[in-house]
Image (cartoon, grey):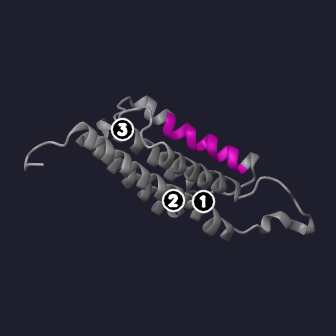
Amino acid sequence: MMAGAEASPATRHRTASRVDRYVGAAVAVLGLAFVFVLVPTIPEDWRTAAGAEYYTVGPRLFPVLAGSFCALMGALLVLFPEGRNALSGLAAPESRRSVGWLLGLSVGYAATLPSLGFLVGTAAVLALFLLAFGERRWWAILLLALSVPLIVEFAFVRLLLLELPPGLLSIPW
């Protein structure tokens, strides 16, 4: 190919398929490693409280589901890299910026979750995600950023009896 000449659509398609397969394989391997290496480190001592043994949903369930889902989606991407949708739009600078925001906010959320706590951290990151992806209606941002963490907190703490990081809310004001 000459300098400055653009690759043919067939060449771009083959390259995209190869990249999809590599990304899919990496996601599948990381998902399996998460399920089989990291999840077993989550303690199961909650099952034998006060001498009784309980068999119910525990703190390992959702990590196993998430890791298994990632492994499955990665494997599907390896097997079917072309999919039905054209991904050419992902090459646009706006898309790369959105992915950058997504990654940056996700890493920031994970890093600050222990200190901010679930309710404060999740409300803040939801508001930032909505702003980063173009939502400008303040009532919608506030409604989602305040209601979703409260609903999730209720489901995990009250229904599933799982603890979420209290963070700032555990400080006696």
Query: Along the line of sight, which residue is nearer the eye, 74 or 42?
Result: 74
Give the extent of the magenta segment: 144-157
Q: On screen, 75 above or below 42?
A: above
Q: Is residue 9 left or right of residue 30?
A: left
Q: Is residue 58 left or right of residue 87?
A: right
Q: Is residue 152 magenta?
A: yes
What's the mark number on residue 165?
1
The residue sitting at 39% across, 44% down in the picture is: 128
The residue sitting at 34% across, 41% down in the picture is: 132
- Tell me the quarter of the picture where residue 84 sits: top left
Query: Along the line of sight, which residue is nearer the eye, 78 or 53?
Result: 78
- Residue where numbered disc 2 is placed: 113
The residue sitting at 70% across, 58% down in the picture is: 59
- Residue where numbered disc 3 is placed: 133
Q: Element under label 2?
A: helix
The image shows residue 105 at horizontal and vertical percentages of 40, 52
Query: Along the line of sight, which residue is nearer the eye, 117 or 21?
Result: 21
The residue sitting at 53% across, 45% down in the picture is: 76
Disc 2 to disc 1: CB gap under 8 Å:
yes
Q: Is residue 171 visible?
A: no
